[in-house]
Amino acid sequence: MKPTLPLEELMSPGHLACQGCGAGIAMRVTLKALGQDTIFTFPACCWTVIDGPFPYSCLEVPLLHMAFEATAATASGIKAAMDALGKSKTTICGWAGDGGTFDIGLQALSGAAERNDDIFYFCYDNEAYMNTGIQRSGATPYGAWTTTTPVKHFKKEAKKSIDDIVAAHKVPYQATASVAYPEDLFKKLVKAKDIRGFKFIHIISPCPPGWKARPEDTVKLARLAVQTGIYPIYEVDGGKYVQTMKTPNRKPVLDYLKLQGRFKHLKESDVADIQKMVDTRYAELEKRFSEK
Amino acid sequence: MKKVMMGNHAISHGATLARVQVIAAYPITPQTQVVELLSEIVADGKLKAEFIKVESEHSAMAACIGASSAGARAFTATSAQGLALMHELLHWAAGARLPIVMADINRAMAPPWTIWTDQNDSLSQRDTGWMQIYCQSNQEVLDSVIMAYKVAEKVLMPIMIVLDAFSLSHTYEIVDLPDQALVDKYLPPFDYKYKLDVKNPHTYGGLTTPDWYMEFRVKMHEAMDQALVEIKKEAGEFEKIFGRRYDTVDPYLVEDAETVLVTSGTAASTARFTVDQLRAQGKKVGNLRMRVLRPFPFADVREQLKNAKKVIVIDRNISYGYHGIWAQEVKSALYGHSKVPVFNFIAGLGGRDIFPETIADIVALVDKKKKPDQELYWVEVKR
Ligand SMILES: Cc1ncc(C[n+]2csc(CCOP(=O)(O)OP(=O)(O)O)c2C)c(N)n1
Ligand code: SF4
Ligand SMILES: [Mg+2]
């Protein structure tokens, strides 16, 4: 059998991610696509811990840990330095969680996107502040339990549409991806690597403790997120939307929700509401996918 | 070459002569001319640098941290609210041991809104791990930016060059613009040993347990001790090439002075004018200008104040519920070494002028007292 991804690993096994951590898979695939000539900066997030405590690191690329809200600006600074030092070929990446992207880091993200700085901005999205103990973020979906949206008062607001916010900046390239489809993510990154300017990659990354799901269901959940249409995966290349994983026969959202304890409290009518929201959003995106 | 320029442009020229490689800045009155001139210099191709026009001061400092980590000489400038917004990242820059140089134009903090000078913005960043240098003239501003990179890159700690809003930032003075060749001789290119390097990948700033955290901190403190040695050494090195000398403190007629006025920033010029007037009347007064706040020059302060019978510290800042901040610093340096009474006066907040008469009145008041009968004295306030 011919492997579909390079065998070379730039993330070593001694990391500190939980069993079944989607964020770990996201990084592993990303490094396979970007290779050794890459520099990362991380804000505060689960990856601050996953990387390993001083003096250890599970990554074989340079990494600058940084403050929570500063990812994009830090990456811009590294990039400017590399340009000034004649090392423009190195790929510079900001790598942040959903909290660091949707919420506290949004301003810096918008600034770098508007300036069209030549960097990758990755958001691995586990839909809550996991590092601090599963508090809601702007990425937490409607209906979810978190420690700040307890069962009796589950989250009543819809997930913020970060992809539309970034798209409004008209960046040269952006994509959504899922850890269940590593080849798709890989292909997108290999393509984006050669595009100059701001690149935004949003990766749905299930989190067993935060989603109250079984570690062995991580890939299944990441796949169901796509197959139900909750998290369609696509790219926007120079303004053109292309769905990279077609889902003609979408599965019911319940298939996805029922595997996660964070949605256990939902009544049938809540699930029906979520199905409606997903259908509306999906139809909206389908229109964009069909635009010539 | 001699040129007439405002303090803000002295900063821009200093940064240009230091061949900074990455500039990231956000506008705020009274700093704007610093970045306006620099963006012009960069756009004209007179300085080979990347200028990131960030969306906030927080991002300015973040970008400087990124750039410096990657091995570039990084520069920014700000004031007041902008400096306060950077606060978290000031700790970060110092903790990451990055030799970033920043100019801070001292502007009082809001509310109420104000744009005029006082030192509460920079002094409230005292414990972030940044060296702080307070300037008195535009020449000193320009020279200090150049010297700052030399010292910062030796000890791997960041430096803030501080100057008063308007009374320096917008005041035109004759400044000797040094030759680029001489500056190049004085300041070698930045060669950062710990840079982000894909050929030698390392992780910086990762999670550190109680087993190691203190070891990072002791090294920062030792770097500051070393910085004091370097600042004094560079005073001589710089003088050899450029003929101007800048030490940690700047004494004026203190040797035989019975009363020494301790000041910082442009208030020192006024104090010296007043000292001359009072000397003409036969009063033995002197002035000690504090130039370096961190690393604090304990030994120099003790030495300069050893003959004084009375010390007056005029603070253009206030630590509410305590003293002026320079007074705290001076008192703690003298404690256990000297019994000289220290009188603390708070003056000139929010840009109120400190006139020679203001200072003469202060001296006259102190003349009447053996020792302070108040923790501090407010100067010329309406009640
Ligand atoms: C300024 C600031 N506020 C709060 C925190 C505490 N904090 C650290 S990580 C984190 C949540 C991170 O959430 P996210 O970005 O979604 O990443 P995840 O932990 O889920 O991987 C918070 C709130 C911080 N480090 N800095
Ligand atoms: S809490 Fe979730 S995101 Fe964080 S390491 Fe564990 S599985 Fe990964
Ligand atoms: Mg998260």
Image: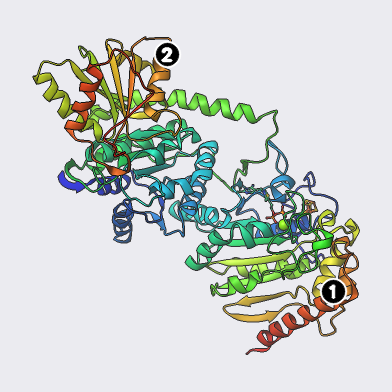
A201 or B240, nearer to the observer: A201
* Residue at image location 20% in from the left, 11% down from the top: B256
Question: Which chain hosts label 2?
Answer: B
Q: In this orientation, does residue B88 appear?
A: yes
Percent across and percent down for residue A204 are 75, 65
Image color mode: rainbow
Could you say which disc has been placed on residue A270 in the image?
1
Q: Secondary structure at mark 1?
A: helix
Image quadrant where one finds the C terminus of chain B: top left
Percent across and percent down for residue B341 are 34, 14
B160 or A128, nearer to the observer: A128
Residue A105's place in the image compared with B65, above or below, is below
User: Which image quarter: residue B310?
Assistant: top left
Say if mark 1 contacts mark 2, CB within 8 Å: no
Amino acid type of disc 1?
Asp
Residue, disc 2: B335
